Image (cartoon, rainbow, N blue to C red):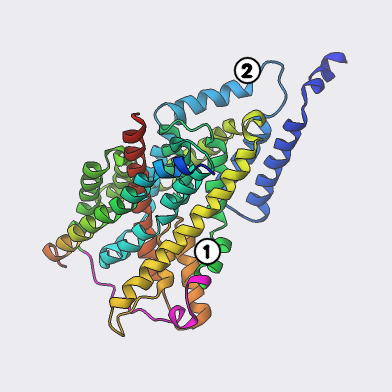
Amino acid sequence: MELLIANFANITWQSVVMWLIGGVLIYLAIAKEMEPTLLLPMGFGAILVNLPIAVPGTGVQHVLGTLFDLGINGAELFPLLLFIGIGAMIDFQPLLTNPKLMIFGAAAQFGIFFTVGAASLFGYDLKDAASIAIIGAADGPTSIFVATELGSKYLGAIMVAAYSYMALVPLVQPPIIKLCTTKAERKIKMVYTGKPVSKRTKILFPIVVTIIVGLVAPDAVALIGFLMFGNLIRECGVLNSLSETAQNVLANLITILLGITIAFQMRAEEFLQLDTLIIIGLGLVAFVFDTFGGVMVAKLMNIFLPEGKKINPMIGAAGISAFPMSARVVHKMGLAEDNQNFLLMHSIGVNVSGQIASVVAGGLILSLVKAIIGG
Amino acid sequence: MHIDKLLAALPIMGTGYLGIFVVTIVIIAVISLLNKTFQK
């Protein structure tokens, strides 16, 4: 009998708090359907790694620790493999039809760079400030990749914040968009021409983007390379079964492993710190200023555009990489102002360009931080 | 407040944000060229 209850003595209040946090993540995943593919494995993993064991680092902690070392810490395999699946899922046609939309993808990375400054002001070292700021990439694999490459000790908190805010885009973005725009601006209608794009362009696009980004931001080449490889599989037209496998089987398999492996970083002794709350707050700052940056650049462009060619500044907010939530938010807001204002194709174009821009931002951050700290 | 750390981060903030626009403009130019070259 004593043997059965011996482990109860190893329970700490910190473990119990982590079980509750795990329970909340599982609740949000199931009841609120907030990023369930990741929040559910993370929530369950948070309970798993905080079960009391006599010797830390053994048992399930050893198993998840090994997965973490192999899939994330070593060569960032999980986020990179997931990018093949994401690349295979994305149709870049709305962007290729109107490439100028990419400007908003770039503009909406403002929150990342703003948050580097904000986190530094809070006293975080440059590598941690940059890792925290990349929450604003609104892109889980990029956040994991950058935080791991920079060796940030806050990976667990960064991941929870990144995926939570991605799920909260429909709540975070609308008030910021409304604050930055007038009713008249939100009613601006944009014509979608839907020009056809040749197959050659669709095939050359992933190759060319990989070369350009690889030359300018070599630290991002793994991310952009795997993303664009997935897209090339999709667009080449001769690898349909591989494309379907990448979109479904590969992406699902890696997502399962990624979610539960990240939970290894949610051990009570590392997660229950004031820093976690500050990081979650700074993540919100990054999302807010991403939205602000995208909308403001669109407003700036409108100053120079003639009447009839003006841009609905709300589409700038879709430049964050949270795909396709952000595009849907903008489309819905357009319809709420005027039920004939269809912004979906424009906002999708901006949204997919945000995917590329967030990877470029991650690569530039890595290059610049490494250059400064000499990594 | 760590003003010294903020000042150290300023080059990353400026160069990084500017860098994204530079890369983006190059990609826009290349896509436009591809669209013109391989018109459907």
Q: Is residue A158 magenta?
A: no
> Residue at 52% of width from left, 39% of height from top?
A123
Residue A157, position in %: x, y?
A: 57, 40
Kindly report which numbered mark, 2 or 1, lies closer to the viewer in this rendering.
1
For the residue pair A233 and A34, the one nearer the viewer reads as: A34
Residue marked by disc 1: A173
* A31 vs A136, nearest the viewer: A136
Q: Quadrant of the N terminus of chain A?
A: top right
Q: Quadrant of the C terminus of chain A?
A: top left
Query: Can residue A184 be seen by looking at this rendering?
Result: yes
Question: Is residue A196 shown left or right of residue A116?
Answer: left
- Specify the segment rendered in magenta: A179-197
Residue drawn where x is 65% and y is 56% of the image: A32
Left/right placement of residue A146 relative to residue A233 reads right
Q: Is residue B18 left or right of residue A142?
A: left
Q: Quick one: which residue is furthest to the right in this view?
A: A1
Q: Amino acid at mark 2?
A: Thr
* A187 in the magenta segment: yes
- Give the residue furthest to the left: B37
> What is the chief secondary structure element of the magenta stretch?
loop
Residue labelled with disc 2: A58
